[in-house]
Image (cartoon, rainbow, N blue to C red):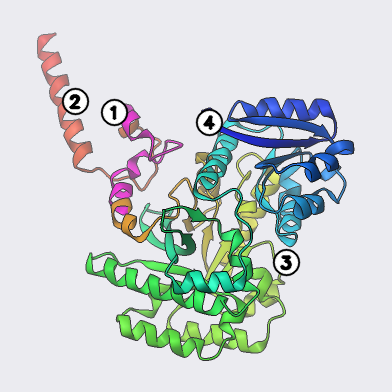
Amino acid sequence: MVLTDNIDVLVIAESQAQGTRLSRMVGRTLSGNYQPCSESEFQRYVVAKRYDVIILGNPSKLSSDVLELIHNHQPNTSLIMFDANSGVNAHLLDQQARRLNVNLVSVLPLPCPPERLEAVVERLTTETHENSADSAPMSAEEVSAALDAGKIQAWFQPKVRMADGRVTGFEALARWIEPDGSMLPPRVFIPSAEESEVIVPLTRKLIADSMNELSNWKRSNLHLKVSINVTVEVLDSENFVTWLQGQLEAHKLAPSSIIIEITESRVAGTASKVVENLTRLRLLGLGVSLDDFGTGYSSLLQLSRMPCSELKIDRSFVSGASDKEETAVLLGNSVRIGHGLGLNVVAEGVETRADWEAVAKAEVDEVQGWFVGRAQSSDSVIPWIEDWNSRQILLKTEQPSRDLRKFSTKKLFSKDQWHFVRPNALGFTLLFILMTLSAVAAKLI
């Protein structure tokens, strides 16, 4: 798969030679104008020109100020890291990038399996198409104005149960859509909202949109759940729990149809009022999910005291779990912790068949990620569910949505298909045809 986006890519490595090798490797999948450079000269490149993508080779061996310089001079650039010890360093590098608000797309191993690179490049290029590359961070006033104008709306990314392939619900994600259909990346408006009081009306808007959609889906006999990210500030805001309860009653929805997600790193050391409000939500029947588990370093004692119903494992413990023993251990232990506390365990960031197989082996309960489906507008949800239900039997393929046209009877009846695939009308029809042809052939012989 070779993409044709003519983008500018800066490749920073230990040496010019390594930078050139990385450029050639990535260039087979992502076309663009590549500028390889060594650590000793990267600063002048970072300062002099705007790049669409920056690639770091073996970042654990580079100076600690590399990410800081990227943060200061390339604020909206997408970053990909290749690291020979990614199983150990992935979550540490991810944490450093998060602290600096750097847009880290993925940490990939060296050598890198082609499917892993292709999945990352596909996500990267899709985001590039959806987002404006030159988007500057929006102020809180601009975010508030966009909210009033109806430009910010909820989009929905599906969650699927591993045991039977059933769509259990969606995560509501904020999307800024301009009148011409262009989309602004969340990173240019979410931080401003979270740092101001705008996050409260924005979150309430997402909740209201989600409840409207839940009502629509219910009328279509689809009993689903929606997960919504809520910050500590929103939980601590005046009358939030009372307002949420009123919304559920107005829409005639079961409280269990809403899951409140709160990030692990934001929960640590929070005021007792926040925990009290989470407990009130659980007593009302809502779900509470601890998001990005594994990145916030909360103690097991604190986790056991949180009124959670769900544990959501961060993508840094999913990506690479298929080929890095250390990452697989972290994933497996996270799942065991969640199950040991009686929690539903969700893995996010499942982007490839290898990721799917890794979380299946770890006995994760539910998954979300691009291997299953991307965030989509409300109008696309029901058609997507119908399409998903029709192609569950093709989950053995790496890209199920693309490979429908490639399936064969061998795949349809393969013995090693996923255990939750049950015979359907198409399967019985093809089986009948095959049996008939076999009987005819036997008579001819």
- Residue at left offset 67%, top offset 73%: 266
Counting every numbered tag in the picture gives: 4
Q: Which marked residue is nearer to the observer: mark 1 or mark 3?
A: 3
In three-dimensional space, the C-alpha distance between marks 2 and 1, rounded to whole angstroms, equals: 10 Å
Q: Which marked residue is nearer to the observer: mark 4 or mark 2?
A: 4
In three-dimensional space, the C-alpha distance between marks 4 and 2, rounded to whole angstroms, equals: 40 Å
Farthest-out residue, right: 40
1 or 3: tag closer to the N-terminus: 3
- Numbered mark located on residue 109 in the image: none
- Residue at left offset 31%, top offset 58%: 379
- Numbered mark located on residue 434 in the image: 2
| Residue type of the residue flagged with mark 2 | Leu
Q: Is residue 217 visible?
A: yes
- Residue at left offset 38%, top offset 36%: 402
User: Foreground: 211 or 101?
Assistant: 101
- The residue beneath circle 1 is 409
Q: Which residues are magenta?
A: 385-410
2 or 1: tag closer to the N-terminus: 1
- The residue beneath circle 4 is 3
Give the answer, above or below, for where 274 lies relative to 195. below
- The residue beneath circle 3 is 297
Quadrant that contains the C terminus: top left
Per the image, label 3 sits on a secondary structure element best described as loop
- Is there a contact, CB below 8 Å, between mark 4 and mark 2? no
4 or 2: tag closer to the N-terminus: 4
Quadrant housing residue 216: bottom left
Q: Which marked residue is nearer to the observer: mark 2 or mark 3?
A: 3
Magenta includes 401?
Answer: yes
Quadrant housing residue 399: top left
- x, y percentage for residue 133? 59, 48
Magenta includes 122?
Answer: no
